[in-house]
Amino acid sequence: MALMNYLTQCTFDHGALEQTPKILDRLGVKRPFVVTDPGLKANGLLAALLAALGKEPAGVFTDTPPNPTESASEIAAEAYRAGQCDGIVAFGGGSSMDLAKAVGLMVNHTRPFEELGGSVKGMKHIGPIPPLVAIPTTAGTGSEVSPGAVVILKNGRKETFVSPHLVPKAAICDPDLTIGLPPSLTAATGMDAMTHCIEAVLTPVVHPPAEAIGVDGAERIGIWLERAVKNGEDKDARWHMMMGSFEGALAFSKGLGAVHGLSHALGRIEALKLHHGTLNAVILPHSLAMIGNQAEAKFARLRRALGLGPNGDLPQYIADLNARIGLPANLRAMGVNEEHGADAIDYAVTDLATASNAIPFEAEQYRDLFKRAL
């Protein structure tokens, strides 16, 4: 029996940022707390948000790390309390949005943070968080409509937190905020969104609306990603890539898979500071090769969406796309080596995404996947 809920309100188009005050008013937020990162403070986008707000927020946290951590979330949560804030504006990529969700959990829950994680079935302990408005500045993670957040805990685990309460009350998707993103970041975040769409389609969880959205998202990204990488000022390409990212997150309410399991595992390696979207891009063709004809009907849908013939090689299509947009050919090119394998495999087996993979994945399959991707 399928259980389907779908998801949150989104204001979407060029110039949507200007709607932020109206949306906060609708939610009853008078003292917003802004969560963002140092890059957006430096490049002027944070100033654009503050100008759109029309008033000084009650608090601003600009120190979101590339992979959000429990420690950084605690600092931000303390600033939220000190500012007597009553809602959160997440402004940035997936890291800022996930850290904002962690702040919401911390300020509204007394239970130890790690006990709310998916690996310990903490969803049952998660209640409402303060009103959250999410404004993405990249087209990749889709966290603005996602019920999840990924945070590195103090114990070293890269934990996934999942609850309907973590879906932002509103999303504001303004493609203008992505104009000027460098080609490398456009490519990496775009392939993050492509991976979301493809893994969501392939997971056996029953949710036809989400699957249909995932197919549309993959088609859209397949058409527009290279244009966005080649010309960051292309407003049409930016619009479609942000829509593809949005659709990827709508789709992965259905689940993800082993690409994310291994990506989460490798993303924990503090010394390497690996980008999540780039990891997904590099791992994806190898996961698809392992799934192969065990998901032939869904592969056929994806081939049609991506403009491949009935016998098209889907894994090779992804590998070739990665090469054309300048992403690494393998994990070794990102600094990963054999010594990282054992710990990553142990972690990946327990990752929440593994449970919904297209085919069963245990340690043996992850060893194979790691070897292929290396």
Image (spheres, rainbow, N blue to C red):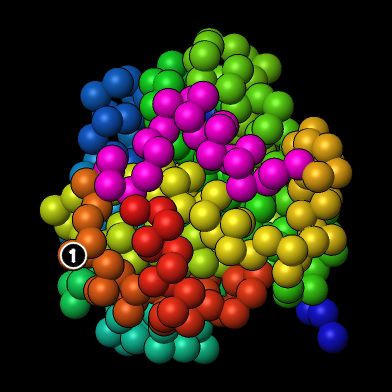
What range of the chain is rendered magenta? 312-334
36 and 248: which one is in front?
248
Q: In which quarter of the image is residue 34?
A: top left
Q: Can residue 44 be seen in this view?
A: yes
What residue is shown at x 58% (from left), y 63% (from top)? 290
* Position above or below: 308 against 288: above
* Quadrant of the rendered image containing residue 257: bottom right
Q: Seen in the image, is 93 located left or right of residue 144?
A: left
Residue 144 in sight here: no
Q: Which SS type dominates the magenta stretch?
A: helix
Disc 1 marks which residue?
339
Q: Which sits in the foreground, 51 or 9?
A: 9
On-image quarter of the N terminus: bottom right
Left or right of 18, for residue 264? left
Residue that sits furthest to the left in the current view: 271
Q: Position of residue 225 (x, y in %)?
A: 60, 27
Find out whether residue 292 is within the magenta segment: no
Numbered marks: total: 1
Residue 8 percent coordinates (x, y): 68, 55
Q: Which residue is drawn at 66% across and 70% down?
A: 358
Query: Residue at position x 60%, y 41% from top?
Result: 316
Apparent side of residue 287 relative to residue 224 in the rendered image (left or right): left
At label 1, which amino acid type do we have?
Answer: Glu
Q: Based on the picture, tell me whether residue 326 belongs to the magenta stretch.
A: yes
Q: What residue is drawn where x is 34% and y is 66%?
A: 265
Q: Position of residue 119 (x, y in %)?
A: 41, 83
| SS state under label 1 | helix
| Residue 336 x/y as whole percent | 24, 52
Q: Residues within 10 Å of mark 1 (few under 14, many from 20)?
A: few
Res. 40 image quadrant: top left
